Amino acid sequence: MADGSERKPSLSEATMAFVIPVMFILWGTVIAKLPAVLALIIATVIACLFGKYFGYSWKTLQEGMFESVYRVNIAIFILIVVGMLVGVWILGGTIPTIIYWGLKLISPSSFLVSTFLLCVVASTMTGTSFGTIGTVGIALMGVGQALGYPLPLIVGAIVSGAYFGDKMSPASSSTNIASSVCEVDLFSHIGSMMWTTLPAAVLTAIIYTIMGMNHTGGGDLGGGIATILQTLGSTFNLSLWTLVPPLVLMVLAYRRVPAVPLLTLSVVLGAIVAFVIQGQSINAICNAAVNGYVGQTGVKQLDSLLSRGGINSITSTVMLLIAAVSFGGVLEKTRVLETIVDASLKWATNVGRLIIAVLFASYIMLIGTGSQSVTMIIPGRAYAPVFRERGLHLRVLSRTVEDGGCIASPLVPWSVHAFYIFGILGVSAYDFAPYAFMCWLVPLFSITYGYTGFAIWRSDNSSIRKPAATVKA
């Protein structure tokens, strides 16, 4: 509880309280090569010291940490269930079947763009980036490795496609959060997002196509793939029944079944397939769910592709998540982030600047808290009165908070989403972020529209056509 001595920090104090811990995280993880969890814990301690300077009690600071951890309880549980799902789906032959047909049907030159488009379709149908990455993404990563692509590039294409649907699908939680917070009809919100997201997706597909055409692979690519295909066929029963779990997952996700029961059902279906189709014992299935699948085919490359999953594989990621959101909770509780966002309003004197200010606020929230939902809720609430006052339609605001907070959430290395990707695919945001082109391009279109007036509407739905339209402060 508050003890009455707390005060809102000044802008200079808030900037120091934000920048110093973040710079320590970057220095510790990138330069000093400290374990990420240690860097995050020390950053949290630094943030707490600033909080004490602002008059907050230890009890209040702890409440901030506990509240932020509570908000990601569902994400932590989903991460645990997906760890189980990956191990069981490999044992049951689901992921090996997808890898097999991926290698048979996808040419090396078209792999990147195919990966991007497949993840676009899967994430749009299911509305979940987590589910897409943990299922289709795992299988496509195996295909890409077999084709000789670098892991960061593969994951970049998976992430770009997965977050298209996370942003655009009517079944996505982020899409519904942004529209509801900004009080915009869901499909009006999606229609507004198409203006920034579809051009970025087309440009992303072109980039991946060009990169794929220039891909040369490595080693005896053809012979290596032939060996993998033969070994997969002899190790697993690649029946079409193995594809039942992902098909059920997509259908039920499209019908908006909540994530936790949906993923739990997917684990159960995977276990049934492993028992009935692959002839695995209950003990082997439970072991795969907890410890992951361990490839023992004798083909080193294939064993590397298949040895993953299980609850134990993501325990370190859970600890990282807790440390990261605790850091963010302190910054929220001490009103550091609120002060920085408030200051951006004074600078936003025209439409272009207003769009940049909303994006900036989303990024500040994302860097500070690591939470995707917070990056949309707080800026959405803070800027809605400003948009109303200046006669701008709120669907421009709802679009912009997703152009910022949603699409950028996997790019911040200590965000919930980046840790999830690292836990499931084993590649950090430091490595894959440069190749997640979709995540970088969307806000560029958003800013361009702000300064040109294109796809910017007034509250009466009329279009603002004058470049860099000036609005009343």
Image: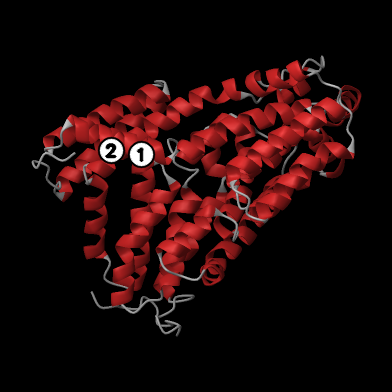
- Residue 360, compared with residue 52, is above or below; it is below
Q: Marks 2 and 1, Cα distance to the nearest angstrom?
A: 6 Å
Mark 2 element type:
helix
The circle drawn on residue 68 is 1
Asked which colour scheme the image uses, the reply is secondary structure
The C terminus - image quarter: bottom left
Amino acid marked by disc 1: Ser
Looking at the picture, how far across and down is residue 111, in whole percent? 75, 44
Looking at the picture, how far across and down is residue 94, in whole percent? 79, 34
The circle drawn on residue 292 is none
Observer able to see residue 360: no
Which quadrant of the figure has residue 219? top right
Looking at the picture, how far across and down is residue 121, in whole percent? 70, 54
User: Residue at (59%, 48%) from the top-left corner?
Assistant: 258
The N terminus - image quarter: top left
The residue pinned by badge 2 equals: 64
User: Residue at (59%, 44%) from the top-left corner?
Assistant: 259
- Is 310 left or right of 332, judged from the image as shown? right
- Is 12 left or right of 262, judged from the image as shown? left
Looking at the picture, how far across and down is residue 207, in whole percent? 64, 53
Marks 2 and 1 in Cβ contact (< 8 Å): yes
Observer able to see residue 164: yes
Amino acid marked by disc 2: Gly
Disc 1 crowd, CA 10 A, few/some/many (<14, 14-19, 20+): many
Mark 1 element type:
helix
- Of 301 and 213, nearer the camera is 301
- Of 347 and 252, nearer the camera is 252
- Residue 407, compared with residue 463, is above or below; it is above
